[in-house]
Amino acid sequence: MFVAHLPAGYLTASYLHRRFSQAGATLRLFIIASMFGAIAPDLDLFYFFLIDHRRTPHHLYWPHFPIVWIALVAASMAWFQWARRKRTVALSLIFCVSGVGHLLLDTIVGDIHWGAPFVYGPFSLFTVEAIYKPWWLNFFLHWSFGFELLLLGWAIWVSRRGGC
Ligand SMILES: [Zn+2]
């Protein structure tokens, strides 16, 4: 995924904010937390380029392990149930939910190791054939990029309407 993560985070927050409005987080803060969560797994790219020097595919780093984000969602949900002040917890929860969303989107054409760290085996719903050079052209000319643009357009449409 190249352009869909931030719009997906925006849409996730826009559609879930009403459900968490009692928690006290403003829509703006809720959206910021969600959009940050939607790109948070890819922060491992800094490690990939600057420290690991591209030796290990970044989908093999723990920020791209679904179990990490699912556990964080579960912990946030438990915290949400018991917390008296729910504003920060709601922000944590939407951040983590969007982290899971990131991995779901990555799974469309990216290789995500859903069993990691217990079982390693990449899984993606569809394969992007290596036809063109440079490599990224294969992704931009694949139908899944149209899906990414659809999410972007949807987010712009919701934004222009002033929310959900
Ligand atoms: Zn990713």
Image (cartoon, helix red, strand yellow):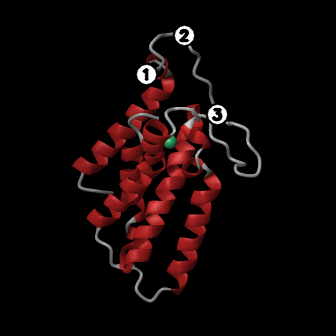
Mark 1: secondary structure = helix
Q: Amino acid at mark 1?
A: Phe
Q: Amino acid at mark 2?
A: Ile
Front-most of 75 and 90? Answer: 75
Q: Quadrant of the C terminus?
A: bottom left
Tell which tag, 2 or 3, sits nearer the viewer.
Answer: 2
- Earlier-in-chain disc, 1 versus 3: 3
Q: Amino acid at mark 3?
A: Leu
Q: Position of residue 106 (x, y in %)?
A: 54, 39
Tell me the distance, in whole angstroms, between the alpha carbons under discs 2 and 3: 19 Å
Mark 2: secondary structure = loop
Q: Position of residue 29 (x, y in %)?
A: 29, 66
Q: Which residue is mark 1?
A: 140
- Earlier-in-chain disc, 1 versus 2: 2
- Dot 2 beta carbon under 8 Å from ligand 1: no
77 shown above or below 153: below
Query: Within 10 angstroms of label 2, few (less than 14), some, or many (20 or more) residues?
Result: few
Q: Which residue is mark 3?
A: 125
- Dot 3 beta carbon under 8 Å from ligand 1: no
